[in-house]
């Protein structure tokens, strides 16, 4: 399908502090198609509240003069242009009703203005509009803009987050009903969203092996956060939010394995880990969010990796990016048995149905690993690449165009 351009409107901006579905797919699309990546616009609140952020300051002159900010990325050197729309209004706090609908319409016009500008300035004629998990703004495009397909991409269950539950879930379901096709990343999301639209298909998350095989091919400097520490390192990479992460389980594991360092790599957007006393444990280190391309340095020094997810409604619908990232690096993985999708990896990872088993399996995962075990993990990850997912994507598109 090399004759389609992709306009990719997404919740996850180009400077996202952890790997995202949309940027990973955009990188793969750009090998054969022009990709116009529309960042989530800043609301006035987000913009002025984050002016200390280098990327916000870089974009500020354009946005403050009511102009779209354009950028290219070194990691996607061809066929890729990102656009950040002008500022929108912070309206999620408002109740449903006429005022909210009016201001939501204004925010939608901001995004549509950017899309229109891209279409005119770059001669876009035959294109697919792909929306990754952002029902705010232009969830789908109007027929007047002539998209060949409107596709909505759902990667999480919005009903379980207080912020998105207020308006996002109803906006998302409206988008799914209106879209030509909906993509979901897990079997549980298919169970949920196929009831909203029969045109719902599973497209699982994946991995770029070229990033994570560096763990096995290169020698990285030991991370400064591990300076002076000895013993085994048990690690995690990913978003450390309060809806998914079982901080109590991490604490129990760290107290049991006092001779090991628990290295937690990822953005922290909550205080739960402090409230339960994890920061008081000397063998637990939180290093914050890291760029995707910096993760191999940390992974190389992890002797086993974790997916310490809660078993709840949120995680039931998750197919985590990190599972294939861990496996592509050849790492042993200990995970809670939180979803049907993670269970499909049971022959390649250590799955725990209880806290006690999870803690015990860490020792099992730290035992010497044979080259055959490592290769099986790598082979599993290599069967779940973004290249193969994009091939699946075009196979689904064939049904609709």
Image (tube, rainbow, N blue to C red):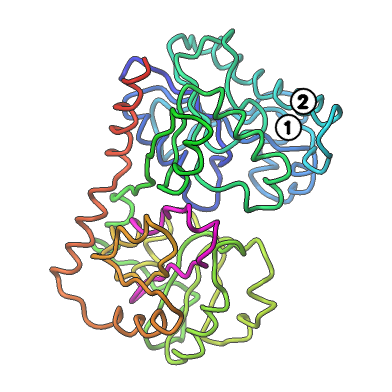
Query: Relative to residue 50, is residue 78 depicted above or below?
Result: above
Q: Is residue 321 magenta?
A: yes
Task: Please report the residue visible at 70 percent of the width from the left and 37 percent of the height from the top.
Answer: 42
**Residue 260 at x, y = what percent?**
42, 86
Q: Residue furthest left?
A: 372
Judged left or right of residue 45, residue 131 is left
Residue corresponding to mark 1: 61
The quadrant of the image that shows the N terminus is top left
Depth check, front residue: 210 or 369 = 369
Task: Please report the residue visible at 40 percent of the width from the left and 37 percent of the height from the top.
Answer: 25
Depth check, front residue: 186 or 371 = 186
- Give the CA distance from mark 1 to mark 2: 6 Å
Query: Relative to residue 2, is residue 348 depicted above or below?
Result: below
Residue corresponding to mark 2: 65
Q: Secondary structure at mark 1?
A: helix
Dot 2 alpha-carbon crowd within 10 angstroms: few under 14, some 14 to 19, many 20 or more: few
Q: Residue furthest front?
A: 195
Q: Residue furthest right?
A: 99
Tag 1–tag 2 contact (CB < 8 Å): yes
**Residue 171 at x, y = what percent?**
66, 33
* Magenta residues (range): 301-324
Q: Secondary structure at mark 2?
A: loop
């Amino acid at each position: 399908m090399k004759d389609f351009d992709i306009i990719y409107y997404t919740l996850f901006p180009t400077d996202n502090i952890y790997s995202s579905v949309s940027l990973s797919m955009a990188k793969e699309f750009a090998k054969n198609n022009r990709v116009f990546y529309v960042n989530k616009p800043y609301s006035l609140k987000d913009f002025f509240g984050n002016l200390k952020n280098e990327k916000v300051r870089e974009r500020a002159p354009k946005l403050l003069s009511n102009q779209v900010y354009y950028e290219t990325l070194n990691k996607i050197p061809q066929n890729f242009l990102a656009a950040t729309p002008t500022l929108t209004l912070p309206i999620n706090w408002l109740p449903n009703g006429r005022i909210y609908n009016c201001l939501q319409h204004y925010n939608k016009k901001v995004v549509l203005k950017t899309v229109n500008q891209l279409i005119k300035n770059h001669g876009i004629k035959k294109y697919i509009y792909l929306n990754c998990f952002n029902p705010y703004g232009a969830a789908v495009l109007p027929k007047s803009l002539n998209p060949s397909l409107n596709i909505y991409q759902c990667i999480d269950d919005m009903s379980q987050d207080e912020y998105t539950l207020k308006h996002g879930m109803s906006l998302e379901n409206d988008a799914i009903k209106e879209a030509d096709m909906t993509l979901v990343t897990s079997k549980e999301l298919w169970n949920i969203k196929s009831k909203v639209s029969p045109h719902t298909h599973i497209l699982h998350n994946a991995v770029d092996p070229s990033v994570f095989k560096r763990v096995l091919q290169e020698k990285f400097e030991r991370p400064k956060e591990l300076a002076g520490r000895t013993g085994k390192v048990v690690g995690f990479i990913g978003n450390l939010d309060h809806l998914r992460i079982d901080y109590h389980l991490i604490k129990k594991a760290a107290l049991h394995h006092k001779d090991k360092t628990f290295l937690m790599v990822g953005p922290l957007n909550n205080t739960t880990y402090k409230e339960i006393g994890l920061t008081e444990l000397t063998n637990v280190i939180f290093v914050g969010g890291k760029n995707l391309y910096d993760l191999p340095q940390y992974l190389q020094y992890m002797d086993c990796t974790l997916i310490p997810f809660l078993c709840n409604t949120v995680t039931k619908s998750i197919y985590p990016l990190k599972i294939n990232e861990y496996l592509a690096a050849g790492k042993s993985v200990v995970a809670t048995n939180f979803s049907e999708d993670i269970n499909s990896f049971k022959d390649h990872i250590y799955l725990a149905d209880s806290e006690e088993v999870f803690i015990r399996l860490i020792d099992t995962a730290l035992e010497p690993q044979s080259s055959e075990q490592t290769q099986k993990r790598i082979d599993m990850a290599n069967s779940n690449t973004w290249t193969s997912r994009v091939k699946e994507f075009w196979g689904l598109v064939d049904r609709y165009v």
